[in-house]
Image (cartoon, helix red, strand yellow):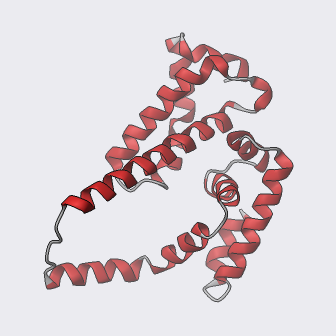
Amino acid sequence: MSPDELQRIAHDPATFEAFYREHVEGVQRFITRRVADPHVAADLTAEVFLAAVDAAPSYRPGRGVPGAWLFGIARNVVSSEHRRAGRERRATARVEGRRLLESDDIARMQERIDAGARARDLYAALDGLPDGERAVFELTALDDLTPAEAAVALGIRPVTARVRLHRARATLRDRLADDDPPAITRPMEA
């Protein structure tokens, strides 16, 4: 779909269907990396496309390809969901008592904790990055956007995106250098 056709998704069902089919897999991959519940992921995917329909008339082709524009929308939708879920967790914590854990529950949780240690190290390192660097890194390393496309999705200049990506990679290499380097260098160099 050309950038000029994108504006028609708001009023042409056939154009919207073509746009949806072209981008739904990428949006789902983006969201499922950031959301653990498949039902929430499905809802957020739908929200992304609803937001795209609403925003389509104001789309400017000079800002970049439609896919990068859509990832920018997806990023905003996921961020909004994380804020909402955080408010819900805080409210629930205020009214909910603690449930006693059985020994089987503890053993299962320990197994999960051990299995996810490497992923937690990486996510902890990612959490330590400034928001701008993390956003560019995720869009390029995880969502297969070019730095220029990530710049469009984030509303920044391409050179800024390349600088942030370089800084993010260097920081992650330094923070994870004591761990298993082959596991972390492949995704960052991809």
Q: Residue at x 19, y 78 (%)?
A: 105
Q: Residue at x 42, y 33 (%)?
A: 46
Q: Tell whether 22 sits left or right of 171.
A: left
- Residue toward you, 1 or 172: 172
If the image is split into quadrants, where does the C terminus sit?
A: bottom right
- Residue toward you, 177 or 187: 177
Q: Would you place residue 46 above or below residue 161 in this image?
A: above
Q: Would you place residue 122 above or below residue 148 in this image?
A: below
Specify the farthest residue to the bottom: 178
If the image is split into quadrants, where does the N terminus sit?
A: top right
Q: Residue at x 57, y 25 (%)?
A: 19
- Residue toward you, 19 or 63: 63
x and y, in percent, of residue 43 in the image: 37, 38
Specify the farthest residue to the front: 94
Number of dots carrying numbers: 0
x and y, in percent, of residue 91 in the image: 28, 55
Specify the farthest residue to the right: 159
x and y, in percent, of residue 133 in the image: 70, 59
x and y, in percent, of residue 172 in the image: 68, 73
Q: Would you place residue 123 above or below residue 102 in this image?
A: above
Q: Can residue 28 be seen in the rendering of this structure?
A: no
Q: Tell whether 8 sits left or right of 63.
A: left
Q: Residue at x 50, y 34 (%)?
A: 48
